[in-house]
C-alpha cells in the first residue's frame, strides 16, 4: 500500500497520470484540426494561407498517433506494476521520458505549423537519412530517432518490471504488443526510391500496427479492465486472450496483402490479401463476445459504471469500424473501385476511434479516479457526464462514418464505375458530395461537444471514500 494515495496498489503507478493528462490534451488538438479540415472541405479558403489542408491533415493524424502512444504508455505504466505485483523498475526514467516525448512532440507539431514542410525537411537535415514525406510518417528523422529512444527506455523500464515480478498472461501479451510496435516502427527508417517498394514496407508500419501488434495491446488492456470491473477468474480471461491474439496474428499478418493489390506487388496478393483480410473481423468479433460474456458472468457490481460502458463500447465500435467497415472494401474486386475514396476515410475514422481511442479512454476511465485519489469511481454526477460524453462522441463518430460512406458510394458511382471517358473528374465529383461534407462538419461539432463533456467530467472531485481529507491532484 502506498501512503500517499491509498487507492493505488503501488506508488509508482502514479507516473501514468501525466501520460493520460497529456494524451487528452493532444486529443483536443487532434479534434480541433479535424474540424479545421472539415471546414476546409466546404469552405476551401478557410484559414488560407495560414493553415493549408495538407498541414492540418498531418497535424490531425500525427496528433492522433502520438496521443494514442501516450495513452498506451500510460496504460502500461499503470497496468504492468499491478500485474507484476511490484513497483515500476524506475519511475524517474518514466517521468524523464515523458518530458522528452512531450517536448519532441510539441516541437514537431510546431514545426509542421510554422515552417513550410520542405523547409522543415531542410532544417532537420532530412537528406542525411530521408524518411519524411509519407502519410502518417511525416515526422522529421530526428523526431523518429527520438521516438526510438523513448520506446527503448520505455520497453526497458516495463521489461525489467515484468522480469522481476509476477508474469501474467495479460502483461506478457501487452509487452509482446509493445515490442512489436517498436520493431515495426523501425521500418519507417526504410525509404527506398522505388515507390512500389516504399509502399510495400510503409504498410509494415501502418497495417501491421493497427491490424497486428496494436490488437495485442488492445486485448490486454481490455482483459485488465474486465478482470477489475467484473471480478471474473483470470483463467477464463486468459483463454479468451489467447484465442483473440492468435486470430489477430494469423489473419492480420498475411492480411497486409489487402494493401498490395494495386501497388505493383505480385498478383498472388490479390488472393492472399482478400482471403486473409476477410478473416480479420474475427478477432474483433471475439472481443465483443469476450466483453459481454465477462460482464454477464460478473462476480461484483463495480461502482465505475462509466469504465464498464467504455469497455463494452470499444469492442462493439471496433467490430463495426474495423470488422464491418473493413470487410466492406477488403476484397480485391470491391477495392478495385473503392480504393482511396471517402469509404477509406469512413473506415479509418470508425476503426481508429472504436478500437484505439476507446480502449485508451476505457483504461483512463478505470484508472483516473484512483490516480486522482478519489477511489474506485467518480461520483454519480461525474459519471453521468462521462456517460453522456460516451454517447455523444460515439454517435457523432457513427454519423461521420455513415456520411462519409454515403459520400464514398456516390463518389464510386460517379468517378469510378463509369467506363473510361465517361467517368466524372475528381473535382467535379467532390462538388457533388458537398451536402455530405456539410453534415460531416456538424457531426464533427457534436463529437467536439462530447469531448468537452468528457473533460468536464474530471472537474468533479468525486466522493471521498476515505476519511483522510485528500487533495485530488
Ligand atoms: C482497428 C483496426 C483498424 C484500423 C485502425 C484501420 C485503419 C485504416 C486506415 C487509417 C486506413 C487508410 C490508410 C491510408 O491512409 O491509405 C485503412 C485502410 C484499409 N483498411 Fe483498415 N483499419 C483497421 C482494420 C481493418 C480491417 C480488420 C480490415 C479488413 C477486414 C481493414 C481493411 C482495410 C482496407 C482494405 C484498406 C485500404 C483501403 C483503400 O484501398 O483505400 N482494416 N485502414
Ligand atoms: C477520435 C476521432 C477521430 C479519429 C480517430 C480520426 C482519424 C482520422 C484518420 C485515421 C484520418 C486519415 C484517414 C485516411 O487516411 O483514410 C483522418 C483524416 C481526416 N479527418 Fe479525422 N479523426 C477523428 C475526428 C475527426 C473529426 C471530428 C473531424 C471533423 C469533422 C475529422 C476530419 C477529418 C478530415 C477532413 C480528414 C482528411 C480526410 C482526407 O484526407 O480527405 N476527423 N482522421
Ligand atoms: Fe490493413
Image (spheres, helix red, strand yellow):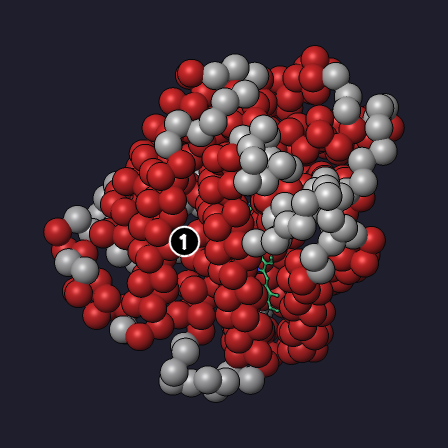
In the picture, measured across the screen, residue 232 lies left or right of residue 273, that is right
Read off the residue under disc 1. 136
Q: Secondary structure at mark 1?
A: loop
Query: At 27% from the left edge and 73% from the top edge, which residue is drawn?
Result: 115
Please tell me whether residue 272 is drawn above or below residue 391 in the rendered image. Answer: above
Q: Nearer the viewer, residue 273 or 169?
A: 169
Query: At 64% from the left edge and 42% from the top edge, which residue is drawn?
Result: 370
Where is residue 42 drawn, in percent x and y? 59, 81
Decide if ligand 1 comes within 8 Å of the CB at mark 1. yes
Q: Is residue 264 visible?
A: no
Q: Mark 1: give few (<14), some (14-19) or many (20+) Cα within 10 Å.
A: many
Q: Nearer the viewer, residue 238 or 160?
A: 160
Query: At 71% from the left edge and 60% from the top edge, which residue is drawn?
Result: 460
Where is residue 41 drawn, in percent x and y? 55, 76
In the picture, measured across the screen, residue 448 lies left or right of residue 73, that is right
Please tell me whether residue 381 is drawn above or below residue 38 in the rendered image. Answer: above
Q: Is residue 442 visible?
A: yes
Where is residue 231 drawn, in percent x and y? 77, 24
Query: At 75% from the left edge and 27% from the top edge, which residue is drawn?
Result: 290
The quadrant in which the C terminus is found is bottom right
Q: Nearer the viewer, residue 175 or 98?
A: 98
Quadrant of picture, ligand 1 = top right
Please tell me whether residue 153 is drawn above or below residue 422 in the rendered image. Answer: above
Amino acid at each position: 500500500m502506498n501512503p500517499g494515495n491509498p487507492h493505488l496498489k503501488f506508488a509508482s503507478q502514479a507516473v501514468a497520470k501525466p501520460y493520460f493528462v497529456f494524451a487528452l490534451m493532444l486529443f483536443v488538438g487532434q479534434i480541433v484540426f479535424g474540424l479545421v479540415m472539415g471546414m476546409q472541405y466546404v469552405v476551401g479558403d478557410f484559414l488560407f494561407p495560414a493553415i493549408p489542408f495538407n498541414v492540418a491533415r498531418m497535424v490531425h493524424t500525427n496528433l492522433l498517433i502520438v496521443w494514442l502512444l501516450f495513452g498506451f504508455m500510460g496504460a502500461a505504466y499503470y497496468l504492468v506494476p499491478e500485474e507484476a505485483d511490484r513497483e515500476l523498475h524506475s519511475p524517474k526514467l518514466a517521468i524523464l521520458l515523458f518530458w522528452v516525448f512531450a517536448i519532441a512532440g510539441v516541437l514537431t507539431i510546431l514545426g509542421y505549423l510554422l515552417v513550410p514542410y520542405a523547409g522543415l525537411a531542410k532544417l532537420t537535415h532530412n537528406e542525411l537519412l530521408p524518411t519524411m514525406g509519407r502519410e502518417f510518417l511525416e515526422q522529421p528523422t530526428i523526431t523518429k530517432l527520438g521516438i526510438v529512444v523513448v520506446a527503448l527506455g520505455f520497453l526497458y523500464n516495463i521489461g525489467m518490471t515484468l522480469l522481476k515480478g509476477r508474469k501474467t498472461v495479460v502483461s506478457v501479451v501487452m509487452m509482446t504488443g509493445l515490442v512489436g510496435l517498436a520493431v515495426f516502427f523501425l521500418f519507417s527508417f526504410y525509404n527506398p526510391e522505388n515507390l512500389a517498394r516504399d509502399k510495400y514496407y510503409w504498410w509494415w508500419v501502418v497495417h501491421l500496427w493497427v491490424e497486428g501488434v496494436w490488437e495485442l495491446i488492445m486485448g490486454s488492456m481490455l482483459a485488465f479492465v474486465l478482470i477489475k470491473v467484473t471480478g471474473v477468474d483470470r483463467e477464463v480471461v486468459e483463454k479468451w486472450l489467447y484465442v483473440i491474439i492468435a486470430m489477430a496474428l494469423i489473419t492480420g499478418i498475411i492480411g497486409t496483402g489487402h494493401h498490395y493489390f494495386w501497388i505493383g506487388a505480385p498478383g498472388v496478393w490479390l488472393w492472399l490479401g482478400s482471403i486473409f483480410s476477410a478473416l480479420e473481423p474475427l478477432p474483433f468479433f471475439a472481443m465483443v463476445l469476450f466483453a459481454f460474456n465477462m460482464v454477464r458472468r460478473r462476480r461484483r457490481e463495480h461502482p465505475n459504471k462509466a469504465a464498464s460502458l467504455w469497455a463494452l463500447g470499444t469492442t462493439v465500435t471496433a467490430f463495426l469500424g474495423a470488422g464491418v467497415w473493413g470487410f466492406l472494401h477488403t476484397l480485391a474486386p470491391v477495392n478495385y473501385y473503392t480504393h482511396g475514396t471517402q469509404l477509406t476515410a469512413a473506415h479509418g475514422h470508425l476503426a481508429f476511434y472504436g478500437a484505439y481511442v476507446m480502449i485508451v479512454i476505457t483504461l483512463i476511465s478505470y484508472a483516473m479516479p484512483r490516480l486522482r485519489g478519489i477511489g474506485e469511481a467518480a461520483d454519480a454526477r461525474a459519471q453521468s457526464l462521462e456517460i453522456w460524453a460516451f454517447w455523444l462522441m460515439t454517435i457523432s463518430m457513427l454519423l461521420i462514418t455513415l456520411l462519409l460512406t454515403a459520400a464514398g458510394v456516390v463518389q464510386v458511382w460517379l468517378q469510378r464505375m463509369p467506363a473510361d471517358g465517361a467517368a466524372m473528374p475528381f473535382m467535379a465529383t467532390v462538388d457533388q458530395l458537398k451536402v455530405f461534407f456539410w453534415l460531416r462538419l456538424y457531426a464533427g461539432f457534436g463529437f467536439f461537444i462530447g469531448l468537452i463533456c468528457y473533460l468536464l467530467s474530471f472537474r468533479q472531485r468525486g466522493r471521498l471514500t476515505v476519511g483522510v481529507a485528500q487533495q485530488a491532484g
